[in-house]
Amino acid sequence: MKGKSLVRAALQGCLAAAVAQAAVAADVKVTPLGGHEGELCPQDRALLFEDPDGTRVLYDVGRTVAGAEDPRLGRIDVILVSHMHGDHVGNAHNKAPGSGSCDKPDTSVSALPNSNTVNIALAKKAKIVTGSEMPPFFAGKLAAGGGDPKDSVLARFGGSVKIGGVAIATVPAFHSNGLDPDYIGGELGKSMKAAGIAGYVGEATGYVLTFSNGLVVYLSGDTGITAEQDLVVRGHYKPSLAVMNIGGGFTTGPTEAAYVINDLVKPKAVIASHVNEVGTREGKVLPGSKTEAFIKAVSVPVHVPLSGRTMTFDSAGKCAAGC
Ligand SMILES: [Zn+2]
């Protein structure tokens, strides 16, 4: 090769490498922060999304994130809470990442009356973005904890808020959303508890996130089958990736969730979530599990969120690595 062509070849090589790196850099990273490294466990809820611009969004903290000190968290910019039940907002949490077993985690650390969500938001100076009537509750907790109540941000149905490179919208979820009186405390909390009454904080929600690379993700939250999954989520937002709760009992089970994915939302791929079972052993889906039933019933690729294993997605919802 002559000198000139050598230079040209080298330049072309550099260009190809730069293009490849830009493609990787434009992917969205999704890291499950579950109860047991490399597995899918019953309490697993938390997913950490990282936009290509670096914005880090933590969805449904739950109990498997071991408080604000959990080293897996790193910087957190935004926390999303689909609804106020203890397994989502985090009424208690793991002693340390992976404490206890997958089946029986040691979630003996109480986070009352604050919640795991509020404690992490205070420590990380993160914004809590919720819909419905939840923002005033979180604003009050942040203020009481020495934080800024303005860090509790409203995204009610129909609108969206943009934080960093991520646009956040809430969508309807058909569930319940009572606030446990343990978060209220005092005489009022005691009386409510005795009467079996929960606090009103509006409807439960799901989310649609639009990342800076164009990837649109639907987060179902706890929900049954809803008409909005067709008319609103697919009809308007057109997500290419969904995170679908499949545990049954409290939400859609594998059969109902598969219908939502195949016939209503129609994404290009789906991450199974909220399985309420030991879904995997040594990272492999257990035969006879709800997770397996869901994978068999769904017509697009199903990704299993193994704790600590980062998956990356391109703008079209295609898993580029880690699946
Ligand atoms: Zn739940």
Image (cartoon, rainbow, N blue to C red):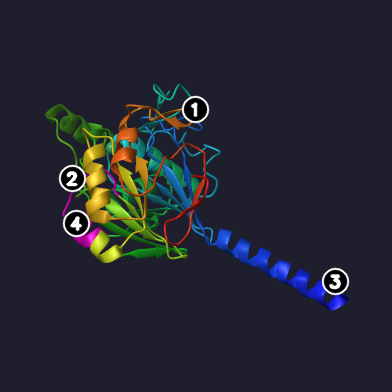
Of tags 1 and 4, which is closer to the observer? 1
Q: Which residue is mark 4?
A: 228
- Give the distance between the C-alpha atoms of the residues marked 4 and 2, in whole angstroms: 23 Å
Crowd class of label 2 (few under 14; some 14 to 19; many from 20; radius 10 Å): few
- Sequence-wise, which precedes: disc 3 or disc 4? 3
Q: Position of residue 262 (x, y in %)?
A: 26, 50
Mark 4: amino acid: Glu
Mark 1: amino acid: Glu
Q: Which residue is mark 2?
A: 200
Identify the image quadrant of residue 159: bottom left
Residue 150: in sight, yes or no? Answer: yes
Image marks 3 and 2: residues in contact by CB distance under 8 Å: no
Of tags 1 and 2, which is closer to the observer? 1
**Chain part drawn in magenta:** 220-233
Q: Which residue is mark 1?
A: 282
- Sequence-wise, which precedes: disc 4 or disc 2? 2
- Give the distance between the C-alpha atoms of the residues marked 3 and 4, in whole angstroms: 62 Å
- Give the distance between the C-alpha atoms of the residues marked 1 and 3, in whole angstroms: 51 Å
